[in-house]
Image (tube, rainbow, N blue to C red):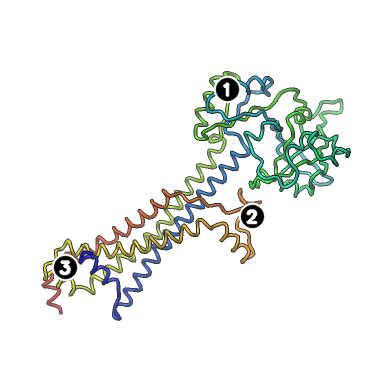
Amino acid sequence: MSYEWFVALRYLKAKRKQIFVSVITLISIAGIFLGVAALIVVLAVMNGFEKDLRDKILGLNAHVILLEYGRPIKNYREIKADIDKMSGIVASTPFIHTQVLIRHRRSVTGAILRGIDPENAFKVISLGKFREGSPVFLQRDYRPSFMKQSKKNDLPGILIGKELAKHLGVSLFDTLTVISPFGETTPMGIIPRMKDFTIVGIFETGFYEYDSSLACLSLKDAQTFLNLGDAVTGIEIKIEDIYKADSVAREIEKKMGFPYWTRHWMEMNKNLFAALRMEKKVMFIILSLIVLVAAFNIVTTLIMIVMEKNRDIAILKSMGSTSKSIMKIFVFQGLIIGLIGTSLGCITGLAVAYNISSISRYLEHLLGIKFLPGDVYYLTELPSRVNPSDVIIVASISLLISLVSTIYPALKAAKLDPVEALRNE
């Protein structure tokens, strides 16, 4: 160990007359510790939000959607076969999308109705966890034996979200009525199309917006109910690399030609993910101010030490220490404070980030409050995802701020005239 490191460590150990300096040193360490820990936890939570949102959105929606201008797609089987042959395509499935009203007794609510192909839809999308029932029950042949003996088995099946079921007050195998505003024209005017369905599955995506407004039919039942014949709204496509959705969408458009056009997940959710990235940058800047405030404490600590150690500095210079060595002593002292604070902050921040769900559940139970109520936020649980590069950046910035904060006090110490310092003793 060089004598500069030895002296720097000794100066951090306060004597009785220097307790105040030691307290300021501890405050500096605590400030850096809190700033680094807060940055790591907040960035991990925001990364978790972004990943959770992306996974849920891409679970319920395809990476790329193919549509036809102004009308449903009729020759969707041939188009699907052509798309499946393209490179980079994992799977594709036809779908129907419309808005309807759903009624059960006196409860009525609006919903998004999707027609899905039970055979291959779940190769492209996911409805999360099924709390009750199963999507295979959309097909009458696969329903439980007691259902086959009931009159409800004659009704087409429907899958609904958990929150939608709660709102309507229904459970598995209950009957509800779906009302389409696109009705039939009669001498009495336009009459909305209405049909009864049996609930054969209740799913939970973890995404409140979908759980409270999404209902799914089999593709055939949706075509019959909406009087579409053998047509669909479009084709959903899953690709190998989600970040190449833009280029894959252009290739599909080029292959299919007019009047077909595509939309991809980045385009459909552009504003949401742009807002998340902007919020992450702003939070990084705001929380970095905590470390910056701690850096001012380091400056204060070192200046006070320089003032108290004038005699020691003068003696060291008289014994042959150079101005560079004196600078090193105080730079090392500031770095030690930064290293201790950064290390403790990283350890605590990572510990909290990896256990944020358990901690949030414990605090919710202890305080009797819900941090993420499902009817307000997109997610119902606090997610976390630690990105190693974020931790490295936070630690590096913290150490850099600590280093920069030592420059002024170290220069003042290096410029000290030993003759003037000893004359006052």
| Image quadrant where one finds the C terminus | bottom left
* Distance (Cα) linking label 3 and label 1: 78 Å
Closer to the camera: disc 3 or disc 1? 1
Three-letter amino acid code at disc 1? Lys
Q: Which mark is residue 416?
A: 3
- Crowding near pointer 1: few (<14 within 10 Å), some, many (20+)? few
Disc 2 on helix, strand or loop? loop
| Image quadrant where one finds the N terminus | bottom left
Residue 31, given in percent of the width and then of the height, sits at 40, 64
Mark 1 vs 2, N-terminal side: 1
The residue lying at 57 percent from left, 22 percent from top is 85
Residue 129, given in percent of the width and then of the height, sits at 67, 45
Q: Quadrant of residue 291?
A: bottom left
Contact, CB < 8 Å: mark 3 with mark 1?
Answer: no
Determine the residue located farthest toward the front in the rendered image: 145
The residue lying at 63 percent from left, 62 percent from top is 369
Disc 3 on helix, strand or loop? loop
Q: Which mark is residue 85?
A: 1
- Crowding near pointer 2: few (<14 within 10 Å), some, many (20+)? few
Residue in front for this viewpoint, 63 or 21: 63
* Distance (Cα) linking label 3 and label 2: 61 Å
Residue in front for this viewpoint, 332 or 281: 332
Residue 114, given in percent of the width and then of the height, sits at 70, 34
Mark 3 vs 1, N-terminal side: 1
Three-letter amino acid code at disc 3? Leu
Contact, CB < 8 Å: mark 3 with mark 2?
Answer: no
Q: Is residue 120 left or right of residue 275?
A: right
* Distance (Cα) linking label 1 and label 2: 44 Å
The residue tagged 2 is 373
Q: Quadrant of residue 210?
A: top right
Residue 247, given in percent of the width and then of the height, sits at 50, 28
Disc 1 on helix, strand or loop? loop
